[in-house]
Image: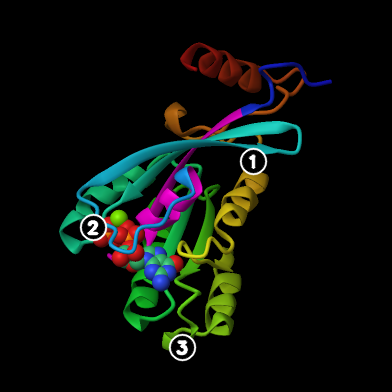
Amino acid sequence: MATIGHNNLNAKLVLLGDMGAGKSSLVLRFVKGQFLEFQESTIGAAFFSQTLAVNDATVKFEIWDTAGQERYHSLAPMYYRGAAAAIIVYDITTTESFARAKKWVQELQKQGNPNMVVALAGNKADLEDKRKVTAEEARVYAEENGLFFVETSAKTAVNVNDIFYEIAKRLPRVQPTQNPAGMVLVDRPAEGSKLHHAVHEVLRHQF
Ligand SMILES: Nc1nc2c(ncn2[C@@H]2O[C@H](COP(=O)(O)OP(=O)(O)OP(=O)(O)O)[C@@H](O)[C@H]2O)c(=O)[nH]1
Ligand SMILES: [Mg+2]
């Protein structure tokens, strides 16, 4: 039986995507339940955290909201390295942002952690009349690349909490990475597993 303290997971999550796709707006909606019509473009990156209860566990997301402007591209590895999960965001009203999302998928496939849970979010789903990327096209692409796909709207809140819940449910219990800060803990440490116990000890002291 699980005991108190064994059901708490910490998960580093990074948002990537074109400038203006709605990364900050999705985070603001998820963390504060708010939406700004004129959300300022992110400089560098911004950090947020939010805890979710999922089944019998709580998942504390440590969220890095990166800047989509090209001049910040070289900073991105600092944020996706060691991340347990990523949300790659595009804007359904621009084909460029979808192309940019595919580039991020490639970059993560090349340089990221193969165990990372990666979600693709087609944001601004409220702007149906301006749609340029079909849900079907994105769904097929996501399926081919092993991504979890959903269309979202930070404005109306459609599917925003859901995408984080879905990621939380897909997190492995323990994700072995080079970087313990990005590790996901951990429901019950497996009996007899030295690694699991060691990991648990590290995190018990960290958090
Ligand atoms: N209609 C609509 N507008 C949105 C939605 N999400 C974001 N926006 C608007 O799109 C603009 C850009 O949103 P941001 O959240 O700043 O985009 P970002 O991806 O963080 O951009 P960078 O920080 O520059 O990378 C803002 O004016 C938001 O109000 C949405 O779901 N629907
Ligand atoms: Mg932003």
Do the numbered discs 3 and 1 sit on residues whose CB atoms are within 8 Å? no
Give ligand 2's quarter of the image: bottom left
Q: Secondary structure at mark 3?
A: helix
SS state under label 1: loop
Is residue 80 found inside the magenta-colored segment of the image? no
Q: Residue at x 40, y 53 (%)?
A: 15
Give whichever of discs 3 and 1 has the lower sequence position: 3
Picture layout, residue 64 above or below residue 148: above
Task: Tell which circle, 3 or 2, labels the residue nearer the N-terminal end.
Answer: 2
In the picture of the structure, the residue carrying the numbered disc 3 is 129
Which numbered mark, 3 or 1, is in the foreground of this view?
A: 3
Horizontal and vertical percent for residue 160? 55, 57
Q: Give me the C-alpha separation between circle 3 and circle 2.
A: 24 Å
Q: Nearer the viewer, mark 2 or mark 1?
A: 2
Tag 3: residue type?
Asp
Quickly name the residue at label 2.
41
The alpha-carbon separation of the residues under discs 2 and 1 comes to 33 Å
Is 7 on the left-hand or right-hand side of 88? Answer: right
Q: Say which of 126 and 139 sits in front.
A: 126
Q: Name the mark on residue 172.
A: 1
What is the magenta range? 9-31
